[in-house]
Amino acid sequence: MGYATEKAVVLVSGGLDSATTLAIAKSQGFQCYALSFDYGQRHRVELTAAQEIAQCLGASAHKTICLNMDSIGGSALTDVHIAVPITGVTEQIPVTYVPARNTVFLSLALGWAEVLQAHHIFIGVNAVDYSGYPDCRPEFIAAFENLANLATKAGVEGQRMTIHTPLIDLTKAQIIQTGLALGVDYGRTISCYQPAAAGEACGVCDACRLRAEGFKQAGVSDPTLYQT
Amino acid sequence: MGYATEKAVVLVSGGLDSATTLAIAKSQGFQCYALSFDYGQRHRVELTAAQEIAQCLGASAHKTICLNMDSIGGSALTDVHIAVPITGVTEQIPVTYVPARNTVFLSLALGWAEVLQAHHIFIGVNAVDYSGYPDCRPEFIAAFENLANLATKAGVEGQRMTIHTPLIDLTKAQIIQTGLALGVDYGRTISCYQPAAAGEACGVCDACRLRAEGFKQAGVSDPTLYQT
């Protein structure tokens, strides 16, 4: 595989996409350092899921960084006064978009990568079956990689940082098929924007709709526990 | 001035450079939203200073975001087991460099700017009398501005974000002269990497040395309280 002795920081949210990304990074031989964020999101059950996923998929370490992005607000995911849309995915950028979230998460991943002397960061962004967030697009990732190589001591010293986005061109169904082939247990992942306290999915938010459609298109049974 | 009705997010650390930056932004007519970070740094007295500075210099609001960058470590400023160098500024990137710090801070400023519908961010980086940090260089700032315009909903909708670095080409003496002309009370600012609990400066760390030399070169008295 060529990467057997290399370290990688992998963003792991507890959801389907990032679990698949971690499985792909492992399959490529990376030593994976899983990173999650307690950023003031609506629910914390995804953080428990992230920890379990990191362990099951053989991450070398798992870290959760706390930051109160809810003090900024501006999103249905960080401000409980803004309702999560439940009427279906639209063409517009939805209110579940969290301002600058992936920029913040990748920046902190970059900091950890520099301390670990890792030159690889994996993020499960996807530009096919997604919610239209600007910070999931290939041009955003390219700009971040360019920034990463100017921002750090490692960059100054000529050690190139690579941002890996193995899901970027896959449909949700392809992501699921890839993960299943690598042994991902999707029953442990939580995609819902507003799950119940025990983790049952609402079934009607954009994340639930995209996920359910993915299982359907992939032709496999959906292991998600839904609220009844 | 042309900017009278415009909002700007201004990074304010409690130090000399960012206080001057805030004064410059105000003098250009911006409504200033001061942003500080409780990021696990060695001392919190700079946060009290930041709050006072924001108030004295007429910021419209002041916000402190908490994030535990000390869980990443890798710097003398976020890991108490790494000593702050006291033997003078060298050519190398010093251990006080915090991995990806300005990338993280600018990312969170970007998030707040988007929520405020502000299109301007001010940061007091300086590439003349500075400690050699990679994330203080003009090429880093240019790369971040490029990223900012791809990362956000505002960017997608064509509202350009500008990163202002009014100190970038100034010597420390010129920064001090600029700030004094704008009424900055440098006695309220704290630059020291390892001040005493009440804020007295050590006088021997790089930040203290650059600051003291700046006052000397500017030909004005140094208002800093030093440990005796």
Image (cartoon, coloured by chain):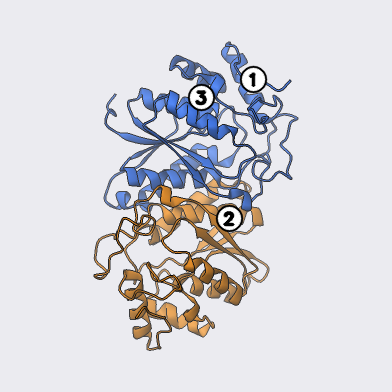
Chain colours: A blue, B orange
Residue at image position (59%, 31%) is A130
Secondary structure type for disc 2? loop
Q: Amino acid at mark 3?
A: Leu
From the viewer's perspective, is residue B69 above or below residue B221? above
The residue labelled by disc 2 is B160
Q: CA distance from mark 1 to mark 3?
A: 24 Å
Secondary structure type for disc 3? loop
Q: CA distance from mark 3 to mark 2?
A: 30 Å
Q: Which x, y percent locates residue A47?
A: 54, 35
Residue at image position (24%, 70%) is B87
Q: Is residue A131 visible?
A: yes
The residue labelled by disc 3 is A170
Most foreground residue, B125 or A221 = A221
Tell me whether the residue at label 3 lies in contact with that at label 2, contact meaning CB atoms closer than 8 angstroms: no
Q: Is residue B155 visible?
A: no
Q: Amino acid at mark 2?
A: Arg
The residue labelled by disc 1 is A225
Residue at image position (34%, 72%) is B129
Q: Is residue B1 left or right of residue B12?
A: right
Q: Amino acid at mark 1?
A: Leu
Q: Is residue A171 left or right of residue A10?
A: right
Most foreground residue, B198 or B220 = B198
Single out the mark in the foreground, 1 or 3: 1
Circle nearer the N terminus (1, 3): 3
From the viewer's perspective, is residue B208 above or below residue A78? below
Q: Quadrant of the N terminus of chain A?
A: top left
Q: Quadrant of the C terminus of chain A?
A: top right
Q: Which x, y percent locates residue B38?
A: 50, 58
Single out the mark in the foreground, 3 or 2: 3
Q: Residues within 10 Å of mark 2 (few under 14, many from 20)?
A: some
